[in-house]
């Protein structure tokens, strides 16, 4: 566990000459302009969430990589000079300079007034040390000038533990505290070093051979650090068993006093100096070589504390200049490659030969860097500060193309000169051409320059050009401000090839395949005839503005842009694209170009040269191994810091604010958030604000999900989430809405029901009235049937008497009397059975047979599917039989008259067929009109009345039989007809 040291110790003097570099590329200074509004910063510590906590003379700060959140007297601090901040499990412990201990919990500061338990801790004004055991969730606080007791803080309670030593307590100094074993290591004025176990109350003396002038000051990772009182040496001891064994003695330089000392995880020593700066010993203590010089940086600032965070980034708190930060990748790159140079200038051009890398800056300065780390700087033109536009190099000659001139250097003598013939051009590019020749692109033309004869040997294109590429013998591609031409080098004829593309660089991938960097359209892949592929932001490029392209392999390009370095691997399908930025170790995102030597990338940026391994770049994680921290959730007017509990609110407190942090410090504040609210919609949104606001969220259950996006587009390895429930007010609940709907609907239903009831009553009255009329009509029809039937019978009797056939008249009268009785009986009934109908028809036909003697035969048949007890409308069939006899039979001369009656049932329909073999009909409507049968008319009227009264469908069908059989067929269909004895039913 990290122990927190007091910084009032003044140590001594260093006697050697270190390597100086004041400002490392990529080092960031956070100060008042960034929200760190304090003059002095002290101790720094990182908590489990990744936040950096800083003590200062203006309270303390929490830094999440974007915002410094300040806690001071306004929030409840009684003493704003905070020397130390100690993260506990659920609290941030605050130890000010004076005796006013406090802690931060859930956004609220508790001091000795609001939590009396804190009054038990007496730290005094002589300094402190504090330690925390995460596993047991307990912390210990020492008063560095009073070793009579130690304070243990656990479960919100303070326990003062007495300490018992054999040595005088006022002569003791704290060296270290082992939080696990709870052993204190101390020294007395005689440099006796011993341990004291808080649990067992036992002392153990360590063996150590120290000089009387030494002053052991601290212990880090089993390494004891001691400083000679005269200030000329630092001694390093390693603890082995119960003995401190001296391992190294470091000679110090007299002019510098040591202010603070830190040992990193690789056992490398960092020393803060009172005179300003940090000495970094880039070697482990276990393999220390005194001859290897340390590096001195930040020498203009006094550093109070050093912190190496969980990502091995380095933090430095200063006395008067805020915080300094440098990522591990920046620092490692600079220490490993540029320990003896100042590499912070703006590189605008880069090239290489087989031995060296050549750099052109935005001023007339240039440099040569060799793999053996030899770096040579020189100025090409002292009279003007011309920016470098292009560099060409082979193993003998280098051409530095500046804005207004080209300088040539002989690498054998390292002498440079500017040929007079090349001092008038506004240089755009230098392109290799023939042996000892290059093509110089400028604002006037495309010139051939022979660097051996140092002469312009011809002009191939008489317009402004930006780039060129020889692709065949005597053939070139030449790019202007807007178009690409094919140019014949012999006759200088040009032909427009690609229109509308501003090419900034051209490279040959292989035979008849080329790549072009454009200013607005990304990267274009083409052959001698057409464009084959265009790679743009839609394919994953960070930008469509490409400065330069360099080849790793024929199918792998590196594109230099103002937003980083892009690697493009051409595949059969979609290209594979990787973006590398400052977060990956580049000194700057503004890249002028790169040089590739096997696995090593030399990258020219606006903040110096970067040297990186391709393999390491590609094996870096594609995501950020961090999660977004949801600091708090504000719902209505209440802020919730504990988001592990159910967060429930209700309208009108349904405005939700999420306070977020994504502590990815290498992104240097370039943080955005990708978020959505599940349950509201499935759309992901992007915001660069750390406050995500939802106004008037409707009632429901939601899950807020958020990813952190760092610089370069890398995102957190997973999302953070928090469930939210918005409960409705009672008038928004489903039951209230249903009740309200019912209360609104019921009156309407009631009114509609009243209206419908009135309509039903009116309709029922109408139906009853109509049925009453129909019943009266039926009675009237029945009243008509009796006279009509009697009239017809009397006509028949009269006919028999006229013939003086008295015997037949007597028989006829006998049957007639039976017919009259049955007719009177059935005319009073609405329905009669099929059996009764057939009996009635038999009487009638027998009577007619007597009248017609041998001229009439009849048959009456009932199908097995017909129940004789089924009910049918009374006296329905007889009028049709009578009509058949009257109009079909009498006029027959060549055959005897015949009547067939047949009852059948199928498909829920009862059918009654009446067939005669009479003269037949030609047109049934016409025949009916001619005959004007009163009986048939009455029957038709009865059918219509039955339909109205009983909803029974009775259909009359009249058919003429064939010429072979002669006659007429009458069919009656009664439906729907249920097979029940009760008669007709629906």
Image: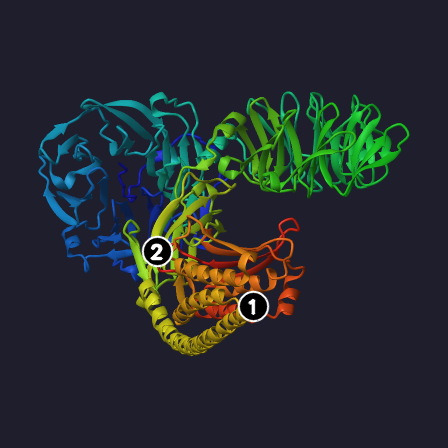
Tag 1: Cα neighbours inside 10 Å, few (<14), some, or many (≥20)? few
Report the front residue among 350 and 843.
843
Task: Using the rendered view, name the quadrant where residue 609 is placed.
Answer: top right
Report the front residue among 654 and 73.
654
Task: Using the rendered view, name the quadrant where residue 78 is placed.
Answer: bottom left
Q: How many marks?
A: 2
Q: Is residue 346 visible from the viewing direction of this image?
A: no
Q: Which residue is mark 1?
A: 803
Residue at 35%, 55% in the rendered image = 633
The local secondary structure at tag 2 comes to strand
Residue at 19%, 49% in the rendered image = 123
The quarter of the rendered structure image containing the N terminus is: top left
The quarter of the rendered structure image containing the C terminus is: bottom left
Report the front residue among 127 and 484.
484
Tag 2: Cα neighbours inside 10 Å, few (<14), some, or many (≥20)? many
Is residue 969 shown left or right of residue 94? Answer: right
Residue 326 x/y as whole percent: 45, 39
Q: Which residue is mark 2?
A: 633
Residue 856 x/y as whole percent: 54, 57
The local secondary structure at tag 1 comes to loop
Q: Is residue 284 above or below residue 102?
A: above
Residue at 64%, 42% in the rendered image = 544
Q: Is residue 281 visible from the viewing direction of this image?
A: yes
Q: Is residue 864 above or below residue 360?
A: below
Which is nearer the N-term, disc 2 or disc 1? 2
Task: Using the rendered view, name the quadrant where residue 438 is placed.
Answer: top right
Q: Is residue 653 above or below residue 99?
A: below
């Amino acid at each position: 566990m990290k122990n927190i040291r007091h910084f009032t110790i003044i140590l001594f003097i260093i006697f050697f000459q270190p390597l100086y570099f004041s400002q490392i590329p990529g080092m960031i200074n956070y100060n008042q302009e960034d929200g760190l509004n304090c003059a002095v910063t002290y101790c720094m510590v990182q908590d489990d969430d990744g936040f950096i906590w800083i003590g200062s003379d203006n309270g303390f700060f929490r830094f999440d990589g974007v915002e410094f959140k300040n806690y001071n007297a306004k929030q409840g601090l009684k003493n704003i000079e905070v020397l130390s901040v100690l993260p506990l499990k659920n609290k941030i412990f605050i130890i000010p300079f004076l005796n006013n201990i406090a802690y931060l919990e859930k956004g609220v500061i508790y001091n000795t007034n609001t939590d009396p338990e804190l009054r038990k801790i007496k730290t005094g004004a002589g300094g402190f040390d504090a330690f925390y055991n995460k596993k047991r969730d307990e912390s210990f606080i020492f008063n560095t000038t009073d070793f009579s007791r130690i304070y243990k803080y656990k479960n919100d309670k303070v326990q003062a533990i007495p300490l018992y030593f054999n040595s005088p307590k006022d002569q003791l100094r704290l060296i270290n505290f082992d939080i696990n074993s709870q052993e204190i290591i101390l020294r007395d004025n005689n440099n006796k070093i011993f341990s004291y176990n808080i649990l067992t109350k036992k002392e153990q003396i360590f063996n150590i051979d120290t000089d009387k002038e030494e002053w052991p000051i601290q212990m880090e990772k089993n390494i004891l650090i001691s400083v000679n009182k005269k200030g000329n040496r630092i001694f390093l001891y390693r603890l082995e068993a119960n003995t401190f064994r001296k391992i190294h003695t470091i000679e110090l330089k007299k002019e510098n006093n040591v202010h603070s000392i830190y040992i990193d995880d690789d056992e490398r020593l960092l020393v803060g100096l009172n005179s300003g700066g940090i000495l970094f010993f880039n070697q482990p203590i276990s393999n220390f070589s005194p001859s290897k010089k340390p590096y001195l940086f930040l020498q203009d600032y006094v550093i109070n504390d050093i912190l190496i965070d969980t990502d091995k980034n380095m933090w430095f708190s200063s006395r008067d200049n805020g915080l300094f930060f440098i990522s591990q990748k920046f620092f490692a790159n600079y220490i490993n490659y540029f320990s003896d140079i100042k590499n912070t200038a703006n590189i605008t051009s880069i090239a290489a030969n087989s031995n060296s890398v050549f750099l052109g800056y935005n001023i007339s300065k240039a440099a040569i860097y060799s793999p053996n780390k030899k770096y040579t700087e020189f100025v090409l033109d002292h009279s003007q500060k011309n920016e470098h536009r292009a560099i060409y190099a082979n193993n003998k000659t280098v051409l530095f193309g500046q804005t207004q001139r080209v300088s040539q250097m002989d690498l054998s003598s390292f002498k440079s000169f500017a040929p007079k013939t090349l001092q008038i051009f506004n240089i755009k590019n230098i392109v290799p051409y023939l042996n000892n020749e290059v093509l110089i692109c400028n604002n006037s033309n495309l010139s051939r320059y022979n660097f051996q004869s140092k002469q312009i040997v011809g002009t191939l294109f008489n317009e402004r050009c930006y780039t060129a590429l020889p692709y065949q013998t005597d053939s070139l591609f030449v790019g202007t401000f807007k178009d690409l031409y094919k140019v014949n080098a012999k006759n200088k004829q040009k032909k427009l090839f690609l229109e509308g593309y501003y090419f900034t660089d051209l490279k040959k991938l292989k035979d008849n395949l080329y790549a072009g960097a454009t200013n607005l359209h990304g990267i274009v892949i083409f052959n001698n005839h057409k464009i084959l592929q265009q790679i743009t932001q839609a394919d994953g490029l960070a930008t469509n503005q490409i400065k330069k392209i360099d080849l790793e392999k024929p199918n792998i390009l590196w594109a230099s842009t103002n937003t980083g370095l892009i690697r493009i691997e051409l595949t059969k399908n979609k290209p594979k694209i990787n973006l590398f930025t400052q977060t990956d170790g580049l000194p700057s995102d503004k890249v002028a170009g790169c040089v590739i030597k096997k696995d090593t990338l030399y990258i020219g940026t606006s903040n110096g040269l970067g040297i990186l391994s391709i393999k390491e770049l590609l094996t870096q994680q594609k995501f950020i191994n961090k999660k977004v921290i949801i600091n708090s959730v504000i719902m209505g007017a209440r802020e919730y810091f504990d988001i592990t509990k159910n967060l429930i609110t209700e309208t009108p407190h349904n405005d939700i604010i999420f306070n977020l942090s994504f502590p990815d410090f290498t992104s240097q504040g370039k943080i955005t958030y990708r978020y959505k609210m599940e349950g509201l919609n499935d759309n992901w949104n992007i915001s660069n604000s750390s406050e995500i606001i939802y106004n008037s969220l409707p009632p429901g259950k939601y899950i807020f999900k958020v990813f952190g996006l760092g610089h370069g587009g890398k995102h957190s390895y997973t999302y953070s989430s928090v469930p939210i429930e918005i409960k409705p007010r009672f008038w928004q609940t489903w039951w209230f809405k249903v009740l309200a709907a019912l209360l609104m609907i019921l009156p309407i239903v009631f009114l509609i029901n009243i209206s419908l009831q009135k309509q039903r009553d009116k309709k029922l009255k109408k139906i009853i009235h109509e049925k009453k009329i129909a019943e009266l009509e039926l009675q009237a029809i029945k009243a008509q049937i009796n006279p009509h039937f009697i009239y017809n019978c009397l006509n028949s009797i009269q006919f028999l008497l006229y013939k003086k056939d008295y015997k037949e008249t007597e028989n006829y009268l006998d049957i007639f009397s039976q017919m009259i009785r049955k007719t009177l009986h059935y005319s009073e009934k609405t329905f009669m059975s099929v059996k009764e109908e057939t009996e009635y028809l038999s009487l009638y036909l027998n009577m007619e047979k007597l009248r017609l003697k041998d001229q009439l035969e009849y048959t009456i048949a009932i199908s097995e599917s017909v129940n004789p007890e089924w009910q049918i409308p009374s006296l329905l069939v007889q009028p049709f039989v009578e009509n058949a006899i009257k109009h079909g039979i009498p006029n027959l001369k060549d055959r005897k008259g015949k009547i067939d009656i047949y009852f059948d049932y199928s498909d829920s329909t009862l059918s009654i067929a009446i067939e005669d073999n009479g003269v037949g009909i030609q047109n049934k409507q016409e025949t009916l009109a001619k005959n004007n049968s009163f009986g048939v008319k009455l029957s038709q009227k009865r059918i219509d009345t039955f339909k109205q009264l009983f909803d029974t469908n009775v259909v009359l069908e009249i058919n003429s039989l064939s010429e072979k059989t002669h006659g007429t067929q009458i069919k009656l269909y009664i439906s729907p007809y249920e097979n029940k004895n009760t008669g007709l039913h629906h």
